[in-house]
Amino acid sequence: TPGSNRQNRKHLHLYSSYKFKSLTKLKRIQRNQSINQPDELLHHTTIYIKMDPFKLIKSVYSVILLIFSIVLISGMIATKQTNLSENAHPAAAYCLLWAAIIWLTMVEGGQASLVGLVPVNAELYANSHPKAYKCTQITNKGDNLDRYLLGRQFMVVLVVFSVNISGGPVGGSDIWGFPGWLKGIFLEAGLAMILLTCNVGQLASQVNASLCMLDYTDNYFALFTLWVAMAIEFSGLLHASYLVQLAVAALAGKKIESNEEPRSVGASIFFFARCLASLAILCFCLAVTFESLFAGKTTMWEGVPPTVAVIVFFILMALVGMLEGMQVAFFAVAKLPKSERGSSPFAIKTCELLFRGEGYNMPAFMVGRQLCVVSCMFFIARVTSLNYPEGETIFNVPEGFQSFLNLGFLGALITTILASISWQLVASAFPLIFLSNPLTYILLRLCLLLEATGLCQAAWVLAAIHKKVAGFQRDEVYIGTAEERADKEMGDQSGHLPIGAGHMVKLPNFADNAPNSLKKLLKKDPTVAQYINDAVENA
């Protein structure tokens, strides 16, 4: 199958009995339900949140914390105590903050939808969802899905940095007489912006987009966001990532397979010219950042020595990289038998914890991971944002250019390439190495602990409200289940999804589409699994 290597094809087509369990309880669609009965089908596909007393308490206090965070950030902007409102009108900070958060909902939700729709026959929804159809006609062509994911990754980091610019507090800020410890937690540590970004901008949209992919992307906002991501990739700004991709594939001894014909001489020259330009820009960003860190000209907390600031920068980049690589490694081994998940003690402990019971820890890790990654990105934004006084510049650049550098977007580019994409590519080629790392087990425990606190429980409340207001319906209402599509000879084509060494992560939805009968047969009779393996290997 184009776009995937043989080993990954084996595990993609070998449906196992493992199931991802979402944090919500979903009523199963009756297998004999006809898709010509939309009212009854909608009843069976309604999302129910099992609201036990403990979860209810977490939902209530999470919503309260979120509302408090929004009010606190709004108050800081109104009193001109944030990075942007200090030097501009508060209205500009409000507009940038909410524009960034709203756009982030589509950047995150769009990924969940467009990746999930890759194997689905697009003709099934060409008439009912024309704009979603236009989106998938772009992403399903050639290697455009990888290009979209590359540009989208930069958009996520850029949006987080924009939130920091508009809502990040300046030093010595004070509001409404709150005690120092409260300001330290919500303002200095950034908890208010973290809760706003995770709950409103990311998790709520991912919940709805993973279940209502067609409705979520059937609008021009989704199409515009897709075009922007593709334009970012085409610009060559992130093409240094492709050099990492080539190096990782060479180290793994695997060829990067493509859905497109080999490049012509002219296309190759244009491609590698952008790679070199991107590498030069990345080196300039690193030079500016390190020079500013050693000179103490960043928004790093006062009193932190330059050497410590540089060490903190590397630690944060490594943490983001580990968290990005972990999600790739976990999904890579999710369908492997226990015997193939590595023999390292930490690999065994990590897998036992991750896949314990009915698989609840996998989505729980994803929620906790989101909190960790966003937290680290806000800290990186603070460490790398320049703070040169008026009239002073770095490397004697023009003052106008220095004003642009002070925005902190250089850190966004560094984070995207070196702390996000590169680690994902490495993990896609060497997942077992990540599993064997003791830090992986520690971070997994940390992510599960953060999810257990319920700080992001508000996302499920927001998702339910958004779903009700927008009138989203699950995809089965329009195109049926995977089994029903197969019965109509318009089954899913999972081989179209490029995975493995040299490809960025494509996050699955919270459930496999394999027929239950096949899952049960594979679990009951291992010889069937062996037969499918042999058939795919010899294909």
Image (cartoon, rainbow, N blue to C red):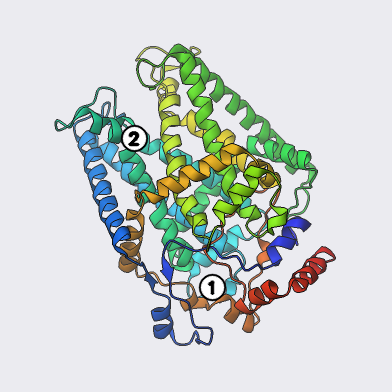
Which residue is located at x 47 percent, y 62 percent?
Answer: 22
The label shown at residue 190 is: 2
Kindly give the residue lying farthest to the left in the view shown: 177
Residue nearest the observer in this picture, 329 or 497: 329
Q: How packed is label 2: few (under 14 Cα within 10 Å), some, or many (20 or more)?
A: many
Q: How packed is label 1: few (under 14 Cα within 10 Å), some, or many (20 or more)?
A: some
Amino acid type shown at disc 1: Ala
Which residue is located at x 53 percent, y 74 percent?
Answer: 125
Whether residue 92 is visible here, answered yes or no, is yes
Q: Quadrant of the C terminus?
A: bottom right
Q: Position of residue 88 (x, y in %)?
A: 27, 29
Q: Dividing the picture into quarters, in which one does residue 417 lie?
A: top right
Element marked by disc 2 = loop
Q: Nearer the viewer, mark 1 or mark 2?
A: 2
Q: Is residue 451 left or right of residue 444?
A: left
Residue nearest the observer in this picture, 439 or 114: 439
Against 365, residue 15 (above or below) is below
Q: Position of residue 41 (x, y in %)?
A: 43, 82
Element marked by disc 1 = loop
Disc 1 marks which residue?
A: 126
Which residue is located at x 44 percent, y 72 percent?
Answer: 474
Against 525, residue 239 (above or below) is above
